[in-house]
Each structure stands twice: as structure tokens, then as C-alpha cells.
Amino acid sequence: MHISILSSSTRIDRLSHRVALSLERLINNGGQHTATVLDLAAYNFPIMEEVLHRHPNPPEGLAEFAAAIQQSDAHIFLSPEYNGTYTSALKNAVDYLKESEFSKKAIGVVAVSAGPMGGMRAALSLQQLVLAVSGYALPQMLLVGQVGQKFDETGAILDPTQEAKIQTFLEHFLWLAEAIAEKKAINAEH
């Protein structure tokens, strides 16, 4: 199973991307699944004028981004909390795509903040986004507060309690993603 991790901060000196790198490494090192970070800062999509399937001149990288989303079996939406919600870059990227790119896939929510609350309001908003694109929202959200103290620049975890929280989140997320993949495989056989 392949998982895409949408790292949605486009800020200079962003800290949330550290968590995306950590999740990618943990999933890939687990040996059963693969993960790729889709870094919205690297894509740098302009404000959406038209959805991809109707766009006469799609922005550079958008077709590749859409293909990566389509080919993934599950997703993790990862965002810092900006003004009580997730990033506009994530909303913009999702809005370019059809609902079908996310439909009937497990989607985990990870919210990050520099403060102690871990982006709770962003996480709740992300859960609503998952439902809006017809994904299956994992009920357990991963909230990462004080991210600068818990991860280094490479995504290495500096806080053992954070490592336990991530492992629990991934255990639940991978269980749901595997269950959905299994059901899809059974349906494909019939």
C-alpha cells in the first residue's frame, strides 16, 4: 500500500514539514508500506482558477500531483494551524482535484503548532475537509504541539513521548487503510 503525506506549509522556516519527514521515514522503515511526502511548498500552485480536468493550461506540476494522489491508497493531511484552521495551500491543492481522487480512501489528520495545543482547531477543520472529499476520516488525530522542541530539521524525533503518540496514530491509520484496501480488493474480485 502506498500513502501520500500532504505537507501543506509553504512558509519560510516552517516547522511542520519536520513531522511529514518523520512520518515518511517511519512508514517506509516499517517494511510493509511506502510513503511519499507531497510538499506543497515545492509545487507552489497558484490560486485555483479552474479544476484540473477542465483547466485549459494547468499549472506546472499539477498533473503529476494529481497522479500521485490518484495512485496513493491512503493519505495523511498534515497542516500547521493558521488562524484557527489548516493552510490555504492545502485547500487550494485539494480544490484543483476531483472528489474521486480522495473518495473511499483512508485519510489521517495531523495538525501541528509551535504552541502547546497542537493545532486542535486545524485538526477539526481537516476532519471536515476529509468528509467533504468523500474520504474516510481516521477518528484519532495526531496533534503535535511545540513542534520545534520535538523534531529536528531532518524529522528526527527528539521527544520519546511524541514517538509513542506517532506510533499509536500510525497503528490506527494503517489498520483503517489496510481494512479499506482489503474491502476494495474483495469488491474488485466480484
Image: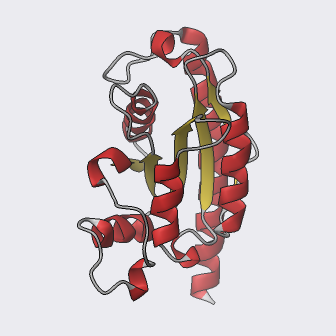
Q: Position of residue 119 (x, y in %)?
A: 65, 30
The residue at the point 72 percent across, 36 percent down is: 121
How is colour applied across the structure in the image?
secondary structure
Does residue 155 appear anywhere in the picture?
yes
Q: In the displayed structure, would residue 162 be above or below residue 88?
A: above
> How many numbered badges does the structure rendering display?
0
Residue at position x 48%, y 73% from top? 97
Q: Please report the residue visible at 32 percent of the width from the left and 68 percent of the height from the top.
A: 62
Residue 125 against residue 119 in the figure, above or below: below
Quadrant that contains the C terminus: bottom right
Q: In the orientation shown, which residue stands out farthest toward the left?
A: 60
Q: Is residue 63 left or right of residue 121?
A: left
Asked if residue 73 can be seen in this view, the reply is: no
Q: Quadrant of residue 31?
A: top left
User: Residue at horizontal 59%, vertical 47%?
Assistant: 174
Q: Position of residue 104 (x, y in %)?
A: 64, 70
Quadrant position of residue 41: top left
Between residue 181 and residue 132, name the one nearer to us: 132
Residue 158 vs residue 144: left or right? left
Residue 172 coordinates in the image, percent (x, y): 67, 42
Residues 133 and 3: in front is: 133
